[in-house]
Image (tube, rainbow, N blue to C red):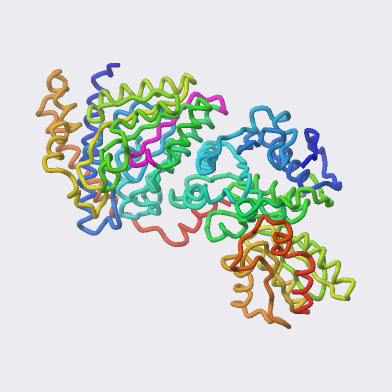
Amino acid sequence: MTSDVPERIEWYRRMLEIRLFEEKVQELFMEGLIQGTTHLCQGQEAVAVGAISALRDDDYLTITYRGHGHALMRGVSMEACFAELMGRTTGCCKGVGGSMHFTDVQRGLLGAFAIVGAGLPVALGAAYSAKLQGLDRVALTFFGDGATNIGTFHEALNLASVWDVGVVFIVENNLYGEYTPLRDTTPIDDLAERSKAYAMPGVVVDGQDVDAVHAAVAAAVARGRAGEGPSLLEMKTYRYRGHSRTDPAKYRPEGELARWQERDPILLLGGKLAAEGVLSEADQAAAREEIRQLVDETADTAKQAPFPTIEEIRSYVYSA
Amino acid sequence: MSTQLEPSPSPAADETTEMTYREAVNAALADEMAADERVYLLGEDVANDGGVFKTNHGLPERFPGRVKNTPICENTFIGLAIGMSITGLRPVVEIMFSDFLPTAGDAIIEELPKFRFMTGGQCALPVTIRSMGGATGRFGTQHSATGESWFIAFPGLLVASAGTPAGAYSVLRAAIQHPDPVLFFEHKGLYGRKGIVTRGDRAVAEIGKGAVVREGADVTIVATLLMADRATKAAELLAGEGIEAEVIDPRWLRPFDLDLVRASVARTGRLVVAEEQVHAGGWGATLVSRLAQEGVAYASPPRVVGLADDLLIPYSPPLEDAIVPDAETIAAAVRAVA
């Protein structure tokens, strides 16, 4: 599958936006404007961008605590994301959720879950709901390699397959479940192999190559939309930072980070676009500068908003 | 267990008849599924021969495609129900034995009550969980819990139960209609119990309102599930002795109808709680604590009757019978405070 040039230039910009957003988050954390913890996704941008660009506006997705990039890609405004991180009323969850719960039900983003594996059944339910209502919507559910060892992974794949539900299970295999290397917790390297036990296609994808991610997800989405059932896609990727705020990632072997950075998703696509003569290095540098400014300005705007009151948040507990 | 129900037609108008607790559950499900095509029933074996406790007879035939058997994976099918509820449906999930609820701990504790809150109130989650529990069935240590108080500590989740057929019909219908998640407890020792049930839209229970099962001026007994039934029997025994006990089935454990109990105790000055669970962490202890903090004055200190704090429910029939409070045990507690 080849996507058109304007779309790929847009992907380039979206990946940059996510990268610079996450870098700004680190900065705001140091200033004390963002507190608690964050799980950043630098290095994994191609997965969110390539996958979510394969969705229709009325499709569904669930994400995880490492979900800033996915939310931005789904169209949650950068200001709402920054404001959420700073606990302000203008945040995408009114400042109540914080870093780990970027959700926008109107956009089909049905939750960012801080419990490993919790989003898979919810995505399954959304896609099943669409099927029951005669809608050809699909659901993507993103989760990490660590989630493939928790029960809901197996239960949700099983149920999706038995009921032919249009869910695309996307494991972002960044090689570490929290602080622990994959092979210390998991007896296989290719997690896509687990699809065999649930009679669905399993595909290993180069998660650094946004073109490859998009093509694989688009195919799985088409399959789900046609009523042919679920798929498991394994994105081989890497997070540049530690698991969360407090993790310096000292457990990684010397040179591993540098090797992955050679295949940085933004560099990879930028290289292709330059070689194709559609986005020069100068254009790329200009885009970076433009987005950096936008990020800075948006963060400044976001921090002007007030914190919510206890009275406001009380109404979020019950709807009736 | 041999009860065969016909596919249950919903009455055109309110109708008061005698029916079993099982039939009342069936009628509530049928009436809600008839009234709202977004209501689905999901769970293990729910569509097979009426389900394991035969509460679902006739529903798969009357509502094709809307009664769905799931694999054995409670945490995932409650998570699935969350996804369904966010996207326009109103799933009712059946948990075959309350003892299986903890396997769905993440979905019930972490997701269902918290989702709306932590997303800033973006949506409602109209999920009903029907959990079938309780002792006296000789089901042994892992199939006999009521589980009624396990989940009362979570803002965002309503918890309800039924001690009578009328309650089963009215409260279950209210739970299914409610836009927020409700965990509804049924007692498998009551399915064959008969009672007068008003069926129809006007019988739908009010959220958070308890029911006075029997009026009395001398002692207030607050009891749920099978204990409500046994408390009523105890009240009949006591009436012969000149003690008039008022029996309240609170129906909702969260939110709890403190007003109803407080008003009753204000008249009687005496309180006995009967619950089929240990004292620690139970709704009975919470009730007594709340009243104490309000400075409610008793003629005699309140008593809580329940399961022994340091025993588990055994299979052996005479021992199970000895452990679960019966009408006489409840009556003895009433005599002690009267």
Q: Nearer the viewer, residue A270 or B112?
A: B112
Q: Nearer the viewer, residue B112 or B54?
A: B54
* Residue A231 screen position, x and y as percent: 41, 26
Q: Nearer the viewer, residue A145 or B268?
A: A145
- Residue A137: say if magenta: yes
Quadrant in which residue B291 is drawn:
bottom right
Mark yes or no: residue A296 visible: no
Is the residue A122 above or below the residue A209 in the image? below
Magenta segment range? A132-149
Is the residue B260 above or below the residue A174 in the image? below
Is the residue A186 above or below the residue A84 in the image? above
The quarter of the picture where the N terminus of chain A appears is top left
* Residue B286 screen position, x and y as percent: 60, 69
Tell me what residue is drawn at x 30 percent, y 30 percent.
A190
Tell me what residue is drawn at x 45 percent, y 28 percent.
A198
* Residue A258 screen position, x and y as percent: 12, 38
Mark yes or no: residue B104 visible: yes
* Residue A75 screen position, x and y as percent: 35, 36
Residue extending farthest to the left is A282
Is the residue B91 above or below the residue A245 in the image? above
